[in-house]
Image: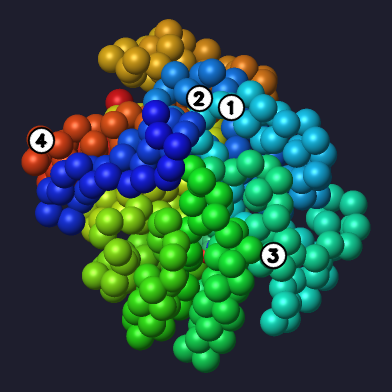
Amino acid sequence: MTDDFRFTLRARDGGARLGEISTPRGAIRTPAFMPVGTAATVKAMYPGQVRELGADVVLGNVYHLMLRPGAERVAELGGLHKFMNWPHNILTDSGGFQVMSLAKLRKLDENGVTFQSHIDGSRHQLTPERSMEIQRLLGSDIQMQFDECVKLPCSHEEAERAMRLSLRWAERSRKAFGEQPGRACFGIVQGGAERDLRIESARALADMDFGGMAVGGLAVGEPQEVMLAMIETVMPHLPEHKPHYLMGVGTPDDLLQSVKRGIDMFDCVMPTRAGRHGLAYTRWGKLNLKNARHAEDPRPLDPTSSCPAARDYSRAYLHHLVRCQEILGMMLLTWVNLAYYQDLMAGAREAISAGRYDDYLAQVKDNWTRDGE
Ligand SMILES: CO[C@@H]1O[C@H](CNc2nc3cc4c(=O)[nH]c(N)nc4cc3[nH]2)[C@H]2OC(C)(C)O[C@@H]12
C-alpha cells in the first residue's frame, strides 16, 4: 500500500504498455477499463459484483452529482466512496463535457459555464475552481481538469479557440487542485481533429505538473480512423512515465486498437448502456437478444465464461427477459458486458506481458467474425 499516487510502467510490446497506478486505495492495473458510475452507481450492478469482475476503478461525474444529490451533501455523508460503498479507486470527470451534451441554456465564457439543470431547470455555474472543489468534496482519487470539448466536425478556428481556453482552464484547474497526497489531477488534450492543435495542446499540458494525461475531444461521432490518427499524433508528445487516458472510448475494437497505440485507461457507457437495451458482447461479437432467432435457443451466451450471467442462462431466457423488459434482463446483460470488457483488458495485459499483443489482437478479432454463435 502506498500513500502517494504513482504510475509504474512494467512492460512494453510495440506501442502497447503494461502498467500499474498505485494509490492509497489500491492498484489500478493498466490497460484498464473503468465502468461508468455516473450517478454514484454502475447501473444495474452491485459494487461487489463490479469488483469481482476485476474493475480497479470506476468513473463518477461532477455534472450529475452536483445536481443530485449535491457535492456538499456527499461530503457530509463521508464522501463518494462511502456513499456508494465502493472503497476502491474513483476517477471523476470534471463536468464540462456533460454540461455541453446534457444541460440546457448553456452560456460559456472565459470564467466557465452557466447552465440550467436538465433535471429541474435550476441554474448552476461550473468553473475550473468549482469543478475541482466538487471533485475534492467527493473525495475523488483521480480528478479531471475542467475543459471544453468541441463537437466534431468543426473548423480549425473553433477547435483552436476551445483548445486554448482548455489550456487556460488547465492552469486554473491544476492550481485549484493544489497538493492532495495520494490523489492526482489529469490534464486533457484537446484540439479537435487538427494535428497542429493536438500537438500544441499535448506539449503545453506536458509542461504542467499533472499526474496523468487524458486525450479528450474524441468519441464524439468521428470515424475510428480519425480517432486513431489523433492518438498517433499526440502519443509522441505525452510523457511516457504518466498514464494515458482516452476519454469516452469505446467499442472493443476501439479499446484494442488504442492499447496498441499507447493508451492505458478507458471509460465508456457502451457495455452498461448496451446491456440495458438487450445487447450482449460475447467472444464472437455483439448479439441483439431482442431478435426472435434467440427465442428457442437453449444455449448460454458463452459456456466457457467465468461470468455466471453468460454461463448459466439460456439465450431463450435472456430473449424472454429482454422482450418483457424485465429488470433481471438488464442486470444479467450488464453483468455479461462488463465481464466481457474486463476480460478483454485482462487478456490484453497478459498478452503485453508475454510480448504477444499483436497475436492477441488478431485472435480476438478473428473470433468476432463468427457472428455471435
Ligand atoms: C459512446 O458513448 C457516447 O459517446 C460519448 C462518449 N464520448 C466521450 N468523449 C468525451 C470527451 C471528453 C472530453 O473531451 N473532456 C471531458 N472532460 N470529458 C469527456 C468525456 C467524453 N465522452 C458519450 O457521451 C454522449 C452522452 C454524447 O454519448 C456517449
- Three-letter code, disc 4: Ala
Residue 50, percent from left and from top:
50, 25
- Residue 133, above or below 294: below
Count the numbered circles shown: 4
Q: Is residue 246 visible?
A: no
- Three-letter code, disc 2: Val
Q: CA distance from mark 3 to mark 4?
A: 44 Å
Q: Earlier in the sequence, mark 4 or mark 2?
A: 2
Residue labelled with disc 4:
354
Residue 134, numbered circle: none
Q: Earlier in the sequence, mark 1 or mark 4?
A: 1
Residue labelled with disc 2:
50
Q: Earlier in the sequence, mark 1 or mark 3?
A: 1
Q: CA distance from mark 1 to mark 3?
A: 26 Å
From the image, state whether disc 1 or disc 4 is nearer to you: 1
Residue at point 9%, 41% (across, down): 355
Relative horizontal placement of residue 23, taking residue 108 as reference (left or right): left
Local crowd size for mark 4, using a 10 Å CA cut-off: few (<14), some (14–19), many (≥20): few
Q: CA distance from mark 3 to mark 2?
A: 32 Å
Residue labelled with disc 1:
86
Q: CA distance from mark 4 to mark 2?
A: 27 Å
Q: CA distance from mark 1 to mark 4?
A: 32 Å
Relative horizontal placement of residue 136, taking residue 141 as reference (left or right): right
Residue at point 33%, 56% (across, down): 242
Q: Earlier in the sequence, mark 3 or mark 4?
A: 3
Residue labelled with disc 3:
129
For the C terminus, the image quarter is: top left
